[in-house]
Image: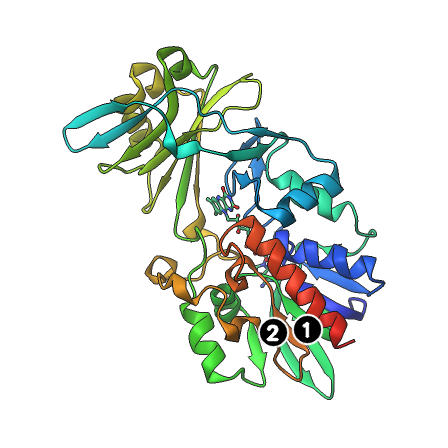
Amino acid sequence: MLPDTEVAIIGAGASGLRLATQLHRAGVDCVVFEARDRIGGRLLTVDPGVDLGATWFWAQETDVVEVISECGLTSFAQYSTGNMVFQIPGSRQVLAGNPLNANSYRLTDGMQSLARGLADQLPSGAIMLNTRVVSLDYSDGVVNIHTSEGPVRAQRAVIALPPATALANIAFTPHLPDGFVGIARQTPVWMGGVTKVVAIYDTPFWRDRGLAGSAMSHVGPLREIHDISDEHATFGALFGFSREAVSAQTALAQLGELFGEQARHARSVIVEDWSRQPFTSPPGVRQLNDYQLFGSKALRAGYWDDRLFYSSTETSVDSPGHVQGALAAAGRVGQQLLIHR
Ligand SMILES: Cc1cc2nc3c(=O)[nH]c(=O)nc-3n(C[C@H](O)[C@H](O)[C@H](O)COP(=O)(O)OP(=O)(O)OC[C@H]3O[C@@H](n4cnc5c(N)ncnc54)[C@H](O)[C@@H]3O)c2cc1C
């Protein structure tokens, strides 16, 4: 039997963790239930220090900047010096300058350090890893939460994961209004259909050739490519996005076409297909593409007598899709919960 709590937060991504720190600070008892064996959700940094999920933030993203400062994290400007490469069928061109990477910043220890910084502000036991929520039911002012590790009772619950993913994996009783369900099921998961490929090299050798490491391609499989070497270039790395499944071999062949023979010989290659991550993306995620549903009123409303709320970047009107959106959503839900306390 897991401990009862005032607020149960489902999901230890940026949104759920930010909400937990805000509630904790306001003296509200809360527990975060996380299905994976790690925190961060779409914030995922792996050896030797490369981001497989979110990479950048921007200076105008006030909540991100605030959390970075609160957590004492350090950042650096995305490498952007040099020219970008443009690929169309049968042709590769080098364009003057690099408009792709203007004004973006990265965290020195990777974007997952933001999740760790938030988690460090919580008391021990406030985050339960490997605890998948499978159903919620509501009656008489109590939300009963059924998890892979047993039941929990909470006064309120917050679903801090993409709405379409929540509806695919979690049963809600009584049924949520049709208007909400229709919108939630159709709301895209930001980057949920993307495969990110990272190729790691001993050095960022393209820089010596006047290249920024960025490219746009109308050929693929990688459509957009960027330099993701660490701050002091102790290793070189390029990453690319693909909308379809892609092998390391095919990705390296394309990097070779774009950046020269040396790019074919990476030290290692990591392929992360987010569409195959059930705690991020529902089945058929690539068919969800109505981005106007982001921040819909129905996603921002309270349900079950204001005992149930949704908080993820997809629910935000401020920078939906970005980490900023996830943090802003947490701010909104935090206010909604405190009003109803
Ligand atoms: C490849 C990629 C690149 C990106 N690049 C950028 C970028 O450069 N800049 C930027 O700002 N944003 C970027 N993003 C988006 C950014 O990562 C997200 O906006 C943000 O991390 C979303 O946070 P969240 O808390 O809303 O959701 P999530 O991070 O998805 O968190 C949801 C959490 O809920 C958990 N969960 C799911 N189901 C259950 C369940 N049944 N029970 C318990 N727990 C559950 C999940 O495991 C996860 O930890 C990128 C995303 C991807 C995938």
* Distance between the alpha carbons at the discs numbered 1 and 2: 6 Å
Q: Is mark 2 within 8 Å of ligand 1?
A: no
Camera-side residue of 79 and 272: 79
**15 with respect to 124 (left or right):** left
Camera-side residue of 149 and 238: 238
Residue visible at 53% across and 17% down in the picture: 233
Instruction: Specify the quadrant of the image occupied by residue 219.
Output: top left
Q: Mark 1 — residue?
A: 145
Q: Is residue 148 visible?
A: no
For numbered disc 1, what is the local secondary structure?
strand
- The answer to whether 80 is drawn above or below residue 22 in the figure is above
**7 with respect to 93 (left or right):** right
Residue visible at 76% across and 70% down in the picture: 338
Locate residue 165, reporting x and y percent: 49, 64
Res. 135 mark: 2
For numbered disc 2, what is the local secondary structure?
strand
Q: For the N terminus, which image quadrant?
A: bottom right
Residue visible at 62% across and 51% down in the picture: 14
Category of crowding for the residue at label 1, using alpha-carbon neighbours closer than 10 angstroms: few (below 14), some (14–19), many (at least 20): many
Instruction: Specify the quadrant of the image occupied by residue 128.
Output: bottom right
> What is the image's colouring?
rainbow
Instruction: Specify the quadrant of the image occupied by residue 93.
Output: top left
Locate residue 304, reporting x and y percent: 64, 83
Kind of residue at badge 2:
Ser
The residue lying furthest to the front in this view is 60
Locate residue 8, reporting x and y percent: 72, 67
Locate residue 230, reporting x and y percent: 55, 24
